């Protein structure tokens, strides 16, 4: 491969929550520090343990050499980089600079859209399992979440339950819905027909749709992302789509997302809502980071990344099937997260998910509690590490936890 996905980076003391956020006592989210003799393998925070594509630090260094950091306006290169990225990777047509707006983060874009089209106390439809960031930001803003659970078919594939969605849209008089595409934490890459059926429901009940597509570049081999806005003219008009280079290129610490909104009315309302808090201002370095990420080398880097992640997912799912009896996992189609269902294992061994988490953390496998994501006996596992570290983590789980 052209790029480095094998080096084991030591991120300790380098402003990385994934390793420096470990605690001496358990918290709702953060793992505890490992016992003596074990190093920490970060598999909880959804960021990657790979060096970024070199064009990102190159762009930052080049800009930092300029001895001025005053007020600025986004350059045309910023917008053209986004347009070219979506045209090339997703076949998007008709995207223009005026359709693109900066967001400090995807969750900020979610809240701004809700504030523009709903009032505190109003119900919002989400699928469950649910990304914990949605739960926190939407509830903190005063909105009521109504969950429509995804269901697993005979092959274990997560599916939308359209009858349940329609029932809840009608019963709760819902007019704003949040989609996650690809889905976090389940890893589904929605097929076009699935999105078409969902968007037809949202049209019927006149819902503004917020489509979080931050994972849309991390699609595993054999699958393809379909932008929600592309499935119909009506979907294009009623959807606020949210993107960022942060998940794709591991740039979350630089802050910088963006929305794509084709409908003038929707866009005016969202921009007005986001401007009222005076928080939603681009950082000049985050602009240059995006430009650096979306250079030709970034296209190559992401293709290699998805190939590496596909191999990690294949290896981990096969290992779980062969070694962890009673643990169920559906192979994700996108993202780099696994969502392990440990219900049968816990019942067979008289243990609970707290025990699995504590014992994993004790031996340095820093995976994440799945219950805040609405997985009742689930664990969320980040596989964006060199394969050697993934293998070491699962061998520790085999020896010290699941088959101790």
Image (spheres, helix red, strand yellow):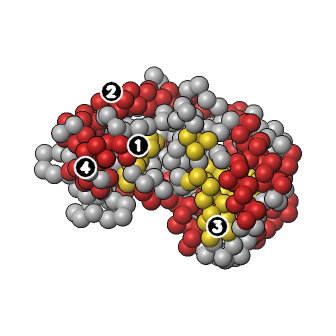
- Disc 2 is placed on an element classified as helix
Tag of residue 111: 3
Q: CA distance from mark 2 to mark 3?
A: 43 Å
Q: Which residue is under mark 2?
A: 322
Mark 1 lies on a secondary structure that is: strand
Q: Position of residue 2 (x, y in %)?
A: 47, 24
Spatial separation of the CA atoms under disc 2 and disc 4: 21 Å
Question: What's the distance in space between the residues labelled 3 and 1, CA to CA?
Answer: 29 Å
Sequence-first tag of 3 and 4: 3
**Residue 131 percent location from the top left of the image:** 53, 55
Q: Residue at x 30, y 53 (%)?
A: 352
> Marks 3/4: CA distance?
41 Å
Q: Nearer the viewer, mark 2 or mark 4?
A: 4
Nearer the camera: disc 3 or disc 1: 1
Label 3–label 4 contact, CB within 8 A: no
Q: Label 1, on which residue?
A: 340
Q: Quadrant of the N terminus?
A: top left
């Amino acid at each position: 491969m052209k790029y480095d996905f094998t080096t084991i980076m030591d991120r300790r003391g380098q402003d990385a929550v994934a390793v420096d956020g470990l605690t001496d006592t358990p918290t709702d989210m953060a793992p505890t520090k490992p016992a003596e003799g074990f190093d920490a393998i970060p598999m909880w925070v959804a960021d990657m343990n790979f060096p970024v594509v070199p064009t990102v630090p190159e762009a930052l260094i080049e800009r930092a050499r300029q001895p001025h950091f005053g007020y600025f306006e986004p350059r045309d290169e910023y917008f053209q980089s986004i347009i070219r990225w979506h045209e090339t990777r997703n076949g998007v047509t008709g995207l223009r600079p005026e359709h693109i707006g900066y967001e400090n983060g995807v969750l900020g874009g979610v809240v701004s859209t809700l504030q523009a089209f709903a009032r505190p106390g109003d119900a919002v439809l989400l699928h469950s399992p649910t990304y914990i960031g949605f739960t926190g930001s939407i509830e903190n803003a005063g909105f009521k979440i109504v969950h429509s659970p995804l269901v697993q078919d005979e092959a274990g594939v997560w599916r939308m339950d359209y009858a349940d969605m329609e029932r809840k849209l009608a019963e709760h008089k819902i007019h704003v819905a949040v989609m996650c595409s690809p889905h976090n934490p389940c890893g589904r890459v929605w097929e076009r027909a699935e999105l078409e059926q969902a968007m037809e429901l949202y049209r019927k009940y006149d819902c503004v749709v917020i489509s979080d597509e931050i994972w849309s570049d991390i699609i595993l081999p054999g699958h393809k992302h379909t932008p929600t806005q592309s499935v119909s003219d009506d979907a294009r008009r009623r959807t606020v789509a949210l993107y960022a280079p942060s998940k794709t290129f591991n740039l979350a610490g630089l802050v910088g997302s963006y929305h794509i909104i084709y409908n003038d009315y929707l866009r005016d309302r969202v921009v007005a809502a986001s401007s009222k808090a005076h928080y939603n201002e681009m950082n000049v370095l985050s602009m240059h980071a995006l430009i650096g990420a979306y250079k030709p080398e970034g296209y190559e880097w992401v293709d290699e990344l998805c190939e590496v992640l596909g191999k990690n997912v294949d290896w981990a799912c096969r290992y779980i099937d062969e070694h962890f009896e009673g643990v169920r996992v559906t192979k994700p189609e996108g993202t780099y997260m696994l969502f392990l269902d440990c219900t049968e294992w816990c019942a067979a061994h008289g243990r609970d998910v707290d025990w699995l988490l504590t014992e994993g953390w004790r031996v340095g496998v820093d995976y994440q509690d799945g219950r805040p994501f609405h997985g009742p006996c689930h664990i969320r596992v980040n596989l964006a590490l060199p394969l050697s570290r993934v293998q070491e983590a699962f061998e520790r789980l085999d020896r010290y936890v699941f088959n101790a």
